[in-house]
Image (cartoon, grey):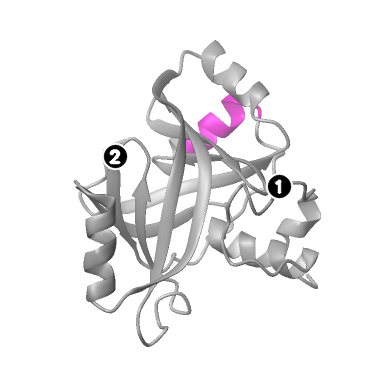
Amino acid sequence: MARQQDHLEIEAKLWVPDLAPVAEALQAHGAALRHPRVLERNIRYEDAEGTLVPGGIVLRLRQDSQVRLTYKSPAEPSSGDGLQARFEAEVVVDDFATMDLILRRLGYRPLMIYEKYRTTYTLGQVEVVLDEMPYGCFVEIEGPPGAIESAVQLLGLAACHRFAESYARLFDYVRANLGLTFADLTFANFAGIEVPFEALLPPGG
């Protein structure tokens, strides 16, 4: 979906136990399959002083059907509607390995590798992505706030839990709650590990 001119990303992230009913609802309501299921490999970077992650800033290199470098500013405070808004700028680059090398030469270091399978649809004014993470399944809906809420209702997702946190932050919760020690969010690392919904919540919360 094309970004707004101010690069503001507005989305809802919802946890679901199974993506199959959501895919069926999308097809039933005439959603267009924009990108078939693809494995994404991401590297998230930190600067030499370690200020990006504590400051809520994301610098990410992603490879799926293309290679993209993304910057995200800290998320704006939630207004209580479960929607998240933040500045996002993204550019397509030609070579994953070379872009990684440039970032390292500039002083950025890989903080974590994370993977997911993503299927992307367009439904009216919104983009709907079905994300299979190593620790569970999520639906992200991006677009104008009113259109997001309409899509949530149309797809039968109104009762689903909404998360404002990033996938990386949820990974932090899962590691803390389950006592995991590995640093990368990959399917290989999670092989054989059952992740209950409660493990996605803040420890002690």
Left or right? Give the position of 138 relative to 99: right
Of the two numbered discs 2 and 1 in the rendering, the one whose residue sits closer to the viewer: 1
Is residue 18 highlighted in magenta?
A: no
Q: Quadrant of the N terminus?
A: top left
| Identity, as a three-letter code, of the amino acid under mark 2 | Gln
Residue 191 got which mark? 1
Residues marked 2 and 1 touching at CB (< 8 Å): no
Residue 66 got which mark? 2
Q: Secondary structure at mark 2?
A: loop
Magenta stretch, residue numbers: 148-156
| Residue at 70%, 31% in the rendered image | 18
Earlier in the chain: of badge 2 and badge 1, it is: 2
Q: How far across and down, in percent of the image, does residue 109 sit?
A: 37, 74
**CA separation in Å, label 2 and label 1:** 27 Å
Q: How far across and down, in percent of the image, does residue 86 sit?
A: 38, 60
The front one of 175 and 81 is 175
The front one of 65 and 12 is 65
Q: Secondary structure at mark 1?
A: loop
User: In which quarter of the view is residue 154 placed?
Assistant: top right
| Residue at 53%, 44% in the rendered image | 116
| Identity, as a three-letter code, of the amino acid under mark 1 | Ala
Q: Is residue 112 above or below residue 154?
A: below
What's the magenta bit mostly, secondary-structure-wise?
A: helix
Q: Quadrant of the C terminus?
A: bottom right
The front one of 17 and 36 is 36
User: In which quarter of the view is residue 99 placed?
Assistant: bottom left
